[in-house]
Image: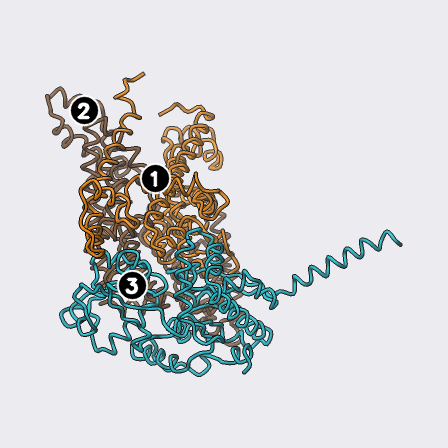
Chain colours: A brown, B orange, C cyan
Amino acid sequence: MTRFQWILAIGAGLASLLTALGALPDASWGVLLVFGATAAYSALRFIIAAPVWMDGVLTAAEVIGVFSLLAAPSLALWSALIATWLLAWLFIERLSRSIRAGAAPALGLLVPLVFGVTLLVLWEVMVRGFGVPDVFLPPPSTIWGKLISSVPTLWKDFEQTFIKGVLSGFALGSIAGLVVAILVDRSPFLKRGLLPIGNFASALPIVGIAPIMVMWFGYDWEGKAAVIVCVTFFPMLVNTVAGLNSAGRMEGDMMRTYASTYWQRLLKLRLPAAMPFIFNALKINSTLALIAAIVAEFFGSPIVGMGFRISTGVGRLDIDMVWAEVAVAALAGSASYGLIALIERAVTFWHPSVRGGRA
Amino acid sequence: MTAIWRSRSFAVVAVVAVLIVVWYLGAVLLNLQPQLDTYQRSGAAVPALPQLINDLWSQAKPILPAPHQVLGEVWNATAAQDITSKRSLLLQGWITLEGTVLGFLIGTALGLLLAVYIVHNEAANRSLMPWIIASQTIPILAIAPMLVVGFNAIGLMGLLPKALISTYLSFFPIVVGMVKGFRSPDQMQLDLMRTYNASRWTVFWKLRWPASTPFLFTSMKVGVAIALIGALVAELTYTGGGGLGVRLLTGSYNGQTVVMWAVLVVAATLAAALVVAVGLAERLTLRGMGAQPA
Amino acid sequence: MNKFIMPMLAGALALAGASSALALDPIKLQIKWVTQSQFAGYYVAKAKGYYSDAGLDVTIVPGGPTTPVPPSLAGGTSDVAVDWAGEALIAREKGIKMVNIAQPYNKAGLELICPKDGPIKSEKDFPGHTLGVWFYGNEVPFFAWMHKLGISTDGGATGVTVLQQAFDVSALVQHKADCISVMTYNELGQAADAGFTADKIIQFNYSDMGNALLEDGLWVLQDRLADPKFKADMVKFVQASMKGWDYALKNPDEAAKIVVAADDSGAATFAHERYMVGEVTKLMGTANGVLDKAVWDRTVQALLDQKFLTKQPDPEAYTTEITDAAFPK
């Protein structure tokens, strides 16, 4: 174990000891067992090397212990929380190291998962332990409850915003960016003139463009798609232009010796070479598109849609609904990013970042 | 010296000229229906074409203001306005700028620290990156009100909550860019450092940090523009103290359409100016480091 | 000895000056929207020194569409707030125990306007059409009205399609909705500027229809009223505020100028604010800001009917103690 991992282990051990002692008067035997065992285990580490999975098991046990202590907040609760956090951190550290040293790569999924769960546990315990009112920050359990009980509403909102607005705007904006990039590539005059203008246009803030687009194109999906096109057009343009320029000169010359036309060179050499850049833009655009759609709905919409629900939820102090919608948005955004990243790996299998080390 | 029609300035001017023509035409098309409605409602007859066009290009609350209307308003609110008056967009822009720059600086610092941590620690790399990406999918406009109230509740008021919302948006391009940048040195160069028995710290300072400079400035250009948007979003929530965002909001409630366009132009110009400033810093730094121009 | 007397005297005078400045109690007022003449009374009271005369150092904190008022009170951003009864009572049920201490606005400024040459001529024509409604807490009176008329808000031929409109009149100008919501003191004037003058529109005024719910009132957190010093400060605050409103009523031009000067964003114009002051003063209730129980009851009933509230608010939701103390009979 590295020095940092030792610090984490000792810290977790001490905090667990504190918890076990603090909980001694009135806690259940389960809690005492878990925290006492962790404290003892941390002391044992000095003598015998501990397996990584044991840290994981202990972390899970401590999480359960923290929640049972939550019923009666006391100093023991906070030391338990610190112990759990440090132990989870240690587990992630050791897991990553063992994956690097050759353990099953599939375990790699566990690391961000454990990190995320630790964050959620910290959130839940701190909000409930400090007694923060729901209208400020609801705990994840309340948000989950609201999510489960509002699936029809959330689905209708998702349909309105994502399926009708985001997908159409994303497609339109990306295709427009691609087409204009090819035009710019064809004409150096346009490249000199259009790119600086595009730079300036991309600096127009979305919170200013959105009300204007909604006013022009209407409150339904057309307005949202218009805002998304404005926002996603430029990243696509810039990245595609850079990508088209990145194709190797030698390969282009070779195609010229075969008497290829501009379009053949474009389709067979330069567009495939531009794919890494294009996918970079698509990844950025996928998250931008969803946010743009939600912002657009703040400025006028029919009474359905994620942005609508969020803005009215804030007004009606339905904060758990707001967070449920935010959770759906985060999930949708991350899922689309991940999907595009997967397609990217398939399409740009030849690129060093996919073949070699880290991307 | 290139011929004039091959130069960049000519191309830009030509494209701008075409855009302005399209804009004027657009103003005619989009403002037509409401203008006809107005004639109908006031009982006046539809005038001849020159007068009609003139009316279309000088509506008080147009759907698409003509370029001269927008530029006129920008001029009125900046050069022709006393800079200490609250109506001056320069003053409002300065207020927004304070939040932007502070948020951008904190965001860059945070982004750099995170990037260093991610590059040097495997666990951080696997655990943090997915969540940092996920954090950007959360619409900031939705949680900005709650963030501001939360900051106020712990005693942070005024400039700092605004800057922190800017930070939230601008740290992401820095992290992503700098992670790529810190990982950009060649394997050969890393091996060379190894033969010198260089510690991780030395490798970082002497190799990774200089190699990432182009990535740093590219990310900073993106980050500074996003920081401005963050400051505007924060001002929509926290309307005390003024700023371009508040001006946009209040202007829209008072039905001042042309003012809103003027604010947009000023905000975009501000963002472009910030990007140019970062570009200038880039040129100076790269020249000082002895880099060849790309 | 002599060379100490002057500095000591100067020091004593300075202390006296400083302590009289220290005697001002800091009070933060959260208003429901951005700086505009809707809150003229408070800006006038501040500018004319009524608050400082009463020993209060008042800071006015502007709000906006994404700034709900109850969290501002609960989080300590403000000590007293202007809010509509609907939002405040919903917050009370969710745990932010707000109490109404004064009710300057008795009538409602909310209206639904439809062009006379449009398809809507009376309430009977609503079904099958699109109506623009504001949200952010302003939708409660509309839904209560539709509930009273028995019209569903889910669209279709027998219901109305509700459009979440922006806070301007573009939905009317561009025929995106058959009718839109306006406030008499703001958007109604903008509609007139756009050609929809009073003779060209049908106005469904919530107050005239008896559907008005309580609008701008002063609310504080219940726990703070237990502190006698805070209560005394609130009495002084209400007195000074109503004095400010009184002055605004009698001097609308000056009131408009004060509001324009107070707007940090520089967007307020004299013409607009002067129009707003004129309209707002028509909504004032008694000179003492005393709550009208009948309108309160109607507001509560509408909230219950529409399921915005699940149970009757307890009697401590409003108090007449402050107004009784401020304006003894």
Residue C5 rendering spot, x and y as whole percentages: 84, 55
**Protein chain holding label 3:** A
Q: Would you say C224 lies left or right of C122 here?
A: right
**Protein chain holding label 1:** B
Marks 1 and 2, Cα distance to the nearest angstrom? Answer: 46 Å
Evaluate if marks 3 and 1 touch, with contact meaning CB atoms under 8 Å apart.
no
Secondary element at tag 3: helix
Marks 3 and 1, Cα distance to the nearest angstrom? Answer: 37 Å
Residue A261 rendering spot, x and y as whole percentages: 11, 25
Three-letter code for the amino acid on which mark 3 is drawn: Arg
Residue B227 location, quadrant: top left
Quarter of the C terminus of chain B within the rendering: top left
Q: Is residue B263 above or below residue A262?
A: below
Marks 2 and 3, Cα distance to the nearest angstrom? Answer: 52 Å
Three-letter code for the amino acid on which mark 1 is drawn: Leu
Q: Which mark is on residue C124? A: none
Secondary element at tag 2: helix
On the same chain: label 2 and label 3?
Answer: yes
| Residue carrying label 1 | B71
| Residue carrying label 3 | A309
Which of the pair B133/B82 is nearer the observer? B82
Residue C199 rendering spot, x and y as whole percentages: 25, 64
Please name the residue shown 28% across and 20% down the image: B4
Please name the residue shown 42% across and 75% down the image: C92
| Residue carrying label 2 | A252
Evaluate if marks 1 and 2 touch, with contact meaning CB atoms under 8 Å apart.
no
Which of the pair B17/A185 is nearer the observer? B17
- Give the number of the mark in front: 2 or 3: 3
**Protein chain holding label 2:** A
Evaluate if marks 2 and 3 touch, with contact meaning CB atoms under 8 Å apart.
no
Quarter of the N terminus of chain B within the rendering: top left
